């Protein structure tokens, strides 16, 4: 049986990256700045998303570049989201896990976005995803998503169109970015929305989705909450829940779930990654 050496695999991957870049130029209509966005790690992510199909990867990446231009990703600023979006703590980046992945946190609120706010919400989501990318460390390319669903209800459930738009943005324009997604304390009513979206989630992403309940970690969560600002006590409570044998276990992300949202701390993170 013939095996492919590491060097041969690297050569093949290098050729695929070059082929994608060549096809992008052939598709045309791109600025030097857009082509600069297509660095080697980015092209490799799009190739992985398309099972190393050069043609599909190039088309997908070309569509992303056009989408970023239309949305005005390069024009996003911190000032645009000051106020309700940032103040609410609905969605934010809570730092990095030990491997350097960004920790993305979303928390449901009792009040729902109004119809006129949906476009603004999607822009804020993109702003937060871009923050995730900027905040990654140690060469990481992925994030862990903690979705706190305790406040979910039919009244504040997003319209299916907004949920579908969210899925499209994630799948089409941030491929190969999700490491793990935890839905925490999702009520039974959430299953109606999730079941409607499930067929539109690709099989690879489905394997990264985990449903957990905080009651399984209640002792540690309560201890961490009681510790408040006592970092030593908080760390002791969280270490008690850690699963060193399974670095992807939710217990290892309890610290970000337990830590309350603090606007000033988040503004410091946004400043550190270059948002103006």
Image (tube, rainbow, N blue to C red):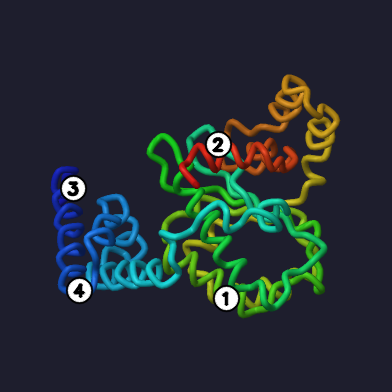
Foreground residue, 226 or 50? 226
Mark 4 crowdedness (10 Å alpha carbons): few <14, some 14-19, many ≥20: few
Secondary structure beneath dot 4 equals loop
Q: Is residue 162 left or right of residue 44?
A: right
Q: Are marks 3 and 4 in contact (CB under 8 Å)?
A: no
Say which element carries label 3: helix
In the rendered structure, find residue 97 and report the number of the disc placed on it: 2
> In this picture, is 14 found above or below 221?
below
The residue identified by callout 1 is 164
* Residue appearing at x 18%, y 59% in the figure: 16
The residue that disc 3 covers is 10
Q: Which residue is mark 4?
A: 28
Say few, some or many: other residues with alpha carbon within 10 Å of mark 2 (under 14 / 14 to 19 / 20 or more): some
Tell me which residue sits at (61%, 57%) in the image: 81
CA–CA distance between discs 1 and 3?
A: 36 Å
Residue 205 vs residue 94, the one in the foreground: 94
What whole-number distance in Å separates the C-alpha atoms at marks 2 and 3?
29 Å
**In the image, residue 188 lies at what x, y percent?**
80, 67
Q: Is residue 209 above or below residue 197?
A: above
**Horizontal arrangement in the rendering, residue 137 relative to residue 166 (left or right):** left
């Amino acid at each position: 049986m013939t095996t492919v050496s590491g060097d041969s695999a690297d050569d093949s991957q290098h050729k695929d990256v070059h082929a994608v870049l060549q096809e992008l130029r052939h598709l045309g209509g791109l600025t030097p700045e857009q082509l600069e966005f297509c660095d080697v790690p980015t092209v490799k992510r799009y190739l992985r998303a398309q099972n190393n199909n050069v043609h599909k990867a190039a088309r997908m990446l070309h569509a992303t570049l056009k989408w970023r231009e239309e949305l005005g990703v390069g024009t996003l600023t911190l000032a645009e989201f000051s106020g309700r979006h940032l103040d609410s703590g609905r969605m934010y980046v809570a730092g990095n896990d030990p491997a350097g992945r960004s920790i993305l946190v979303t928390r449901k609120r009792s009040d729902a976005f109004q119809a006129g706010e949906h476009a603004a919400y999607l822009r804020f989501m993109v702003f937060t995803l871009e923050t995730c990318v900027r905040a990654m460390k140690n060469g990481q390319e992925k994030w862990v998503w903690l979705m706190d669903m305790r406040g979910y209800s039919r009244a504040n459930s997003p319209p299916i169109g907004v949920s579908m738009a969210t899925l499209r943005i994630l799948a089409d324009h941030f491929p190969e970015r999700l490491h793990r997604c935890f839905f925490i304390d999702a009520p039974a009513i959430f299953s109606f929305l999730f079941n409607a979206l499930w067929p539109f989630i690709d099989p690879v992403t489905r394997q990264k989705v985990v449903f957990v309940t905080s009651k399984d970690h209640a002792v540690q969560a309560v201890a961490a909450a009681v510790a408040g600002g006592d970092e030593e006590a908080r760390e002791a409570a969280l270490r008690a829940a850690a699963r060193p044998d399974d670095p992807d276990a939710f217990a290892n992300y309890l610290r970000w779930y337990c830590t309350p949202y603090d606007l000033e701390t988040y503004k410091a993170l946004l400043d550190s990654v270059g948002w103006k």
